[in-house]
Image: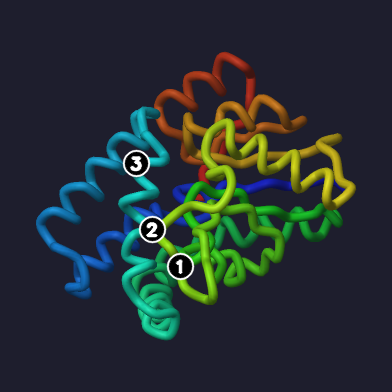
Amino acid sequence: MSLAIFDLDNTLLADDSDYLWGRFLVKLGVVDADWYESENQRFYDEYKAGQLDIFEFLAFSLAPLAEHDMPTLQAWRAQFMDEVISPLILPKAKQLLDKHRDKGDTLLIITATNRFVTELIAATYGIDNLLATEPEMINGQYTGKVAGTPCFQEGKVERLHEWLQSNQHDLDGSYFYSDSRNDLPLLKLVSHPVAVDADDTLSAHAKQAGWQQISLR
């Protein structure tokens, strides 16, 4: 039984849930529309270029979680799932997950997007194991800060190693599916790296390294 690891945004999902959550908050009118839309786009562009300052971005993206109570946030998230995320669920992604399930592999999503946004998406795909950036919470309220190491670039490697140790698992025969140059550190560690609808940088690296390239679109 091997470990099958999946990036979420633009891999299993046909868009970026972090970016879309920001746009959803603008639509709800709960953030300053012009400024938030502009910053959200800037951070997304920097992410795609491999130039994102993750701590600057998290200070921006986690702030709204701290400004509202949990029932309100959960109601917004339910609406977000229904209106925004559900149309982005990829049938071919579900087929790929089922292929690994049939082999008896352990499925794990690893994503830089925070757990509040992603935990219901992982559940929709039927995956119990989720490594995501963790928003700090005190007494049932988000603080706007990040707890521990952000699950991004080399941070994904660190978080995965912690998970492997805690779950008595290893990377023998492992797979990792991702679309992003930001995931090269982890792709280089697994037995079977797979580029999925990859960005130009990852696609070029995959071609040079002889990695498999697929599309789930």
In the foreground, 40 or 31: 31
Q: Quadrant of residue 199?
A: top left
Q: Nearer the viewer, residue 56 or 129?
A: 56
Q: Are marks 2 and 1 in contact (CB under 8 Å)?
A: yes
The local crowd at label 1, few if under 14, some if 14 to 19, many if 20 or more residues have their Cα within 10 Å, is many
Which residue appears at 41% of the width and 68% of the height?
85
Could you give the CA–CA distance between mark 2 and mark 3, rounded to whole angstroms? 10 Å
Could you say where residue 188 lies in the image, as x and y percent from the top left?
66, 25
User: Mark 1 sits on what residue?
Assistant: 142
Q: Return the x and y of residue 132 as percentages of the image width and height.
A: 57, 53
Amino acid type, callout 3: Glu
Q: Residue furthest left?
A: 34
- Residue at the image point whose x is 13% and y is 62% from the top: 33
For residue 135, side relative to residue 43 (left or right): right
Pointer 3 residue: 56
Instruction: Using the image, determine if residue 107 lies above or below residue 54.
Output: below
- What's the CA distance linking mark 2 and mark 1? 8 Å
Residue toward you, 192 or 9? 9
User: Which is nearer the N-term, disc 2 or disc 1?
Assistant: 2
Which disc is residue 62 wearing?
Answer: 2
Of the residues under marks 2 and 3, which one precedes in the sequence?
A: 3
Tag 2's secondary structure?
A: loop
Q: Amino acid at mark 1?
A: Tyr
On screen, residue 213 above or below 123: above
Q: Position of residue 107 (x, y in %)?
A: 73, 55
Three-letter amino acid code of the residue under disc 2? Leu
Under tag 1, what secondary structure?
Answer: strand
| Structural crowding at the residue carrying mark 2, measured as other residues with C-alpha within 10 Å and reported as few (<14), some (14–19) or many (≥20) | many
* Label 3: element kind: helix
| Location of residue 73 in the rendering, given as x and y in whole percent from the top left corner | 39, 77
- Comparing 5 with 165, the one in front is 165
Residue at x 70%, y 59% (from the top left corner): 129
